[in-house]
Amino acid sequence: MLMARRSVHTLPAALAAKGLHDSVTLALLKPDLLASPHTVRNIVGEIQRTPGLRIVGRAGLFWTRAQAEAFYHEHSGRFFFRRLVAYMTSGPIEALALRGPRAVARWREMMGSTHPVRMRVANPACLRARYGLTDTRNSFHGSDSPASAARELAFVFGEQALREMAS
Ligand code: ADP
């Protein structure tokens, strides 16, 4: 267990050494989206049609409370934490591993920033502006750095799968 945890921390360095440090990222389609298979198909199609971004891993998740708390542990002291955990355990999640040049930053740009209502003014074309509901129920997740991407991809897909995606 401890060994596994230590090796997760070496993954960003391993990816950086291959020149891949920002070219794989984790995208999550959060539970509100999964209520509509048609919406999920549209979003996945939009990602597939995005030049330079490739889906290299896909998994359906249904998190327990402990898994949601672990994934978002850095927010555990925040006022919205309980609401966030309740949301992320309210239904299934679609996880996508995306690969391509600057995948971490590009997916964040496509998604838009945290607050959908603000995004409807600032960047109406972004995914959160189009699909997001509220500050918490904002429909998408994207890793915020190469190190987060490595940790989160390993959390969702496992370390071995991450190494294969990045090779
Ligand atoms: P992002 O997902 O945009 O990178 P954070 O990592 O800061 O944002 O927060 C994780 C998630 O917690 C957000 O996607 C959102 O669901 C929720 N959240 C963040 N900030 C707020 C807030 N001020 N009020 C309510 N929920 C929030």
Image: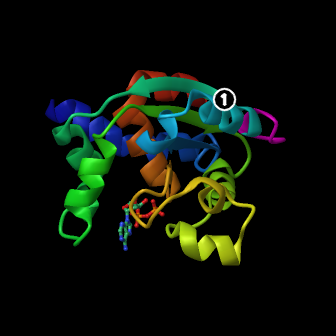
- At horizontal 50% and vertical 67% (from top left) the residue drawn is 114
- Can residue 153 be seen by looking at this rendering? yes
The one nearer the camera, 81 or 105, is: 81
Please give the count of numbered marks on the rendered protein.
Answer: 1
- At horizontal 58% and vertical 76% (from top left) the residue drawn is 118
Answer above or below: position of 38 versus 145: above
Q: Which quarter is ligand 1 in?
A: bottom left
Q: Is mark 1 within 8 Å of ligand 1?
A: no
Answer above or below: position of 145 versus 99: below
Task: State the residue position of label 1.
Answer: 41
The one nearer the camera, 139 or 104, is: 139
What x and y, as percent, mark residue 22?
Answer: 61, 50
Q: Is residue 154 magenta?
A: no
125 sits to left or right of 17: right
Q: Quadrant of residue 130?
A: bottom right
- At horizontal 25% and vertical 51% (from top left) the residue drawn is 85
In the rendered image, the quadrant that contains the C terminus is: top right
In the rendered image, the quadrant that contains the N terminus is: top left
> For the residue marked with disc 1, what is the amino acid?
Arg
What x and y, as percent, mark residue 57?
Answer: 56, 25
What x and y, as percent, mark residue 40?
Answer: 60, 33
Answer above or below: position of 130 versus 79: above
Answer above or below: position of 41 versus 80: above
The kind of secondary structure element at disc 1 is helix
Which stretch appears magenta?
47-53
What x and y, as percent, mark residue 5?
Answer: 23, 38
Q: Is residue 52 magenta?
A: yes
